[in-house]
């Protein structure tokens, strides 16, 4: 899996889609990222990343039912694929490997 690379925002989006599970659509994803990370996200940048992740096979999407609240428009719901979950796991392991490689003396200096 090391040949695959997720950008930081791609990773955040994929993790958020996984957190939201079957409720992961554009506005919900933006709201969740903003609440959890105190980070502003534009719907345009999110849509670009969602499309890219879907093209890579890391996410899949399907339309929900039309609702009155949305003027008859349907929401597009996203979910993480099995390949996407493997990529997330590999990314987590890479990051933990880096954290674990930091000498203890550095971590102790920072804590003190």
Image (cartoon, rainbow, N blue to C red):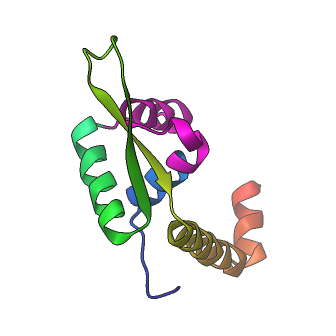
Q: Which residue is pictured at 27% across the width and 36% down the height?
A: 43
Quadrant position of residue 68: top left
Give the residue displayed 43% in from the left and 47% down from the top.
Answer: 78
Residue nearest the observer in this picture, 68 or 15:
68
Quadrant position of residue 110: bottom right
Q: Quadrant of residue 34?
A: top left
Residue at x-position 43% and y-position 81%: 4
The answer to whether 77 appears left or right of 68 in the picture is: right
* Lateral position of residue 94 relative to residue 57, left or right: right
Task: Determine if the magenta segment contains residue 61.
Answer: no
Q: Can you give x and y, in whole percent of width and height, for residue 82 in the image?
A: 56, 68
Predominant SS along the magenta part? helix
Q: Indicate whether residue 38 is drawn in magenta.
A: yes
Q: Magenta stretch: give its range.
A: 17-41
x and y, in percent, of residue 20 in the image: 56, 40
What residue do we see at 45% from left, 29% from top? 31
> Is residue 7 placed above or below 21 in the rendered structure?
below
Nearest the viewer among 64 and 8 is 64
User: In the displayed image of the protein, which residue is found farthest to the top?
Assistant: 68
Q: Quadrant of the C terminus?
A: bottom right
């Amino acid at each position: 899996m090391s040949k695959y690379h997720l950008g930081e925002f791609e990773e955040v989006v994929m993790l958020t889609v996984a957190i939201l599970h079957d409720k992961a659509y554009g506005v919900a994803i933006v709201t969740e990222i903003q609440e959890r990370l105190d980070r502003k996200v534009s719907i345009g940048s999110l849509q670009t990343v969602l499309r890219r992740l879907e093209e890579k096979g890391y996410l899949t999407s399907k339309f929900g039912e039309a609702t009155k609240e949305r003027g008859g428009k349907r929401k597009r719901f996203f979910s993480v694929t099995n390949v996407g979950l493997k990529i997330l796991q590999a990314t987590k392991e890479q990051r933990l490997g880096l954290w674990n490689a930091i000498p203890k003396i550095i971590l102790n200096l920072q804590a003190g």
